[in-house]
Amino acid sequence: MTALRRVAAACVAVLLALPGAAQQTAYKTFVYTSDELANEISRMNGERDASRGYLGDLFNATKGSAKGIASGYVTSFFDLGINAVGALLTQNSRRKAQWEEVVKKENVYQTVINSVSEMNDFYDDTSFDGAMDPKGMRFDGIGCLRTEGRDTMFYISCHIDRTKLHRIINHSKFELVLDTLIVSPEHSNLPNTQLAIPFSFKDRKNFTLSMDIAITSSWMNEIVQLQQNQELGRFNINIPVDQKMLDGKGFFRYVRHGDDAPRYKVTGECFIVPRSYMGFRDDKDNFKDCWGTGEYKLSITIKETCDVTEQYRAQWKEDYKHRKQLAKAGKKNNLIEQSWQMISTQKWDELAQSWVITTLKAPVSKISSDVINGLGLDD
């Protein structure tokens, strides 16, 4: 029940409605935590020796990073390149190959969401037993939300698979399971163009949502060897969405209830985050081995793809002419932006008990101080 309340609390966090919303994309990514998970692992562990320390084990994680992350980080701006729409304005020929190339690029949208800095406290306390001691594990999954005003356009939520907790005990690895998915092809980022061309099942088919999650960490082991930015694991979700799967509002909605077997598979696995060695002396001046609470980073790639229908391809000449008209009108009215940038922030949400990464991708002129203030990226 606690996990469900946290998901609900995360869902109510919505982005402000900003001018030019159609020309910008903002995601909020949640890293869930659970106080009950550690108890579930301990109960399953039973009478087994809880000590998992090995000389030379992996590790890195001091609590010092919390002071920066809790107050929020803002990344520098990243130039995402020049939009290809302008190429249409300079072409004198209407050859089909040109149209095919433009539409092919439109049928793919991809964005990468990275944690701004290390997220600390994979575990709730330090350990005296070793770098891979799972006791107090708090990390419980990942979610991602995209809104337009107060409407949810996309939401996905994955939690640690409770049916495979034995893998944490036996192999120091965990797996994820898909709990919730809300997605609408008609409200997606496709077609990936600045022209006023909406998604239509008459023109587009085979809509597919893909999500790739990579977890990395850095740590210091007991023999003072630093391991830098090592990938601990990777997860992939690939879900085709057909028009027949949508509700009356054009959305595909999937919710896994209780202990139901998942309908869609999350492939991959990940090692639990290694604890970094941090020996200390107690009040009696006795030196003791100690391992920290675990720091890690996320990299999430969200990708939407589709194909064109044969009917749309057969009408390429009419569509090419229509696109040129839209592009000329957009350029005349300064509606076509050429350069795109991205900005992110990362904070700890005390109410939802989760890390929140807010990522905004927009034309350069749209990323103003008002946008940054509105998204809370200036904290």
Image (cartoon, rainbow, N blue to C red):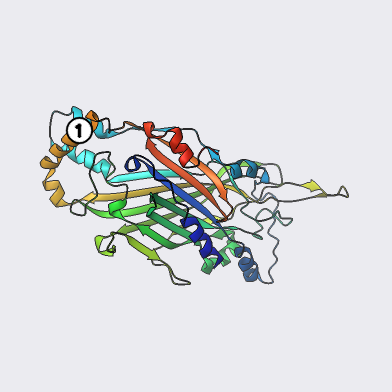
Q: Is 186 placed left or right of 135 in the picture?
A: left
Whether 321 is drawn above or below 171: the answer is above
Which residue sits at x=65%, y=48%? 59
Please say whether residue 33 is visible from this viewpoint. yes
Q: Is 126 placed left or right of 295 in the picture?
A: right
> Which percent across, then down, holds residue 98?
18, 36
Most foreground residue, 120 or 227: 120
Which residue sits at x=31%, y=54%? 208
Element under label 1? helix
Quadrant of the snapshot with the N terminus: bottom right
Please, what is the three-letter code of the amino acid marked with disc 1?
Answer: Ala
> Which percent across, then down, holds residue 302?
39, 48
Neighbor class of circle 1 (other Cα within 10 Å; few <14, some 14-19, many 20+) is: some
> Which percent across, then down, holds residue 167?
56, 64
Please say whether residue 96 is visible from this viewpoint. no
Whether 35 is drawn above or below 196: the answer is below
Reading the image, the residue beneath label 1 is 329
Farthest residue to the right: give it. 284
Most foreground residue, 371 or 295: 371
Q: How many marks?
A: 1
Q: Is 319 placed left or right of 78 in the picture?
A: left
Rendering quarter of residue 48: bottom right
Which residue sits at x=27%, y=53%? 186
Quadrant of the snapshot with the C terminus: top right
Most foreground residue, 282 or 144: 144
Whether 17 is drawn above or below 78: the answer is below
> Which percent across, then down, holds residue 299?
48, 46
Whether 125 is drawn above or below 368: the answer is below
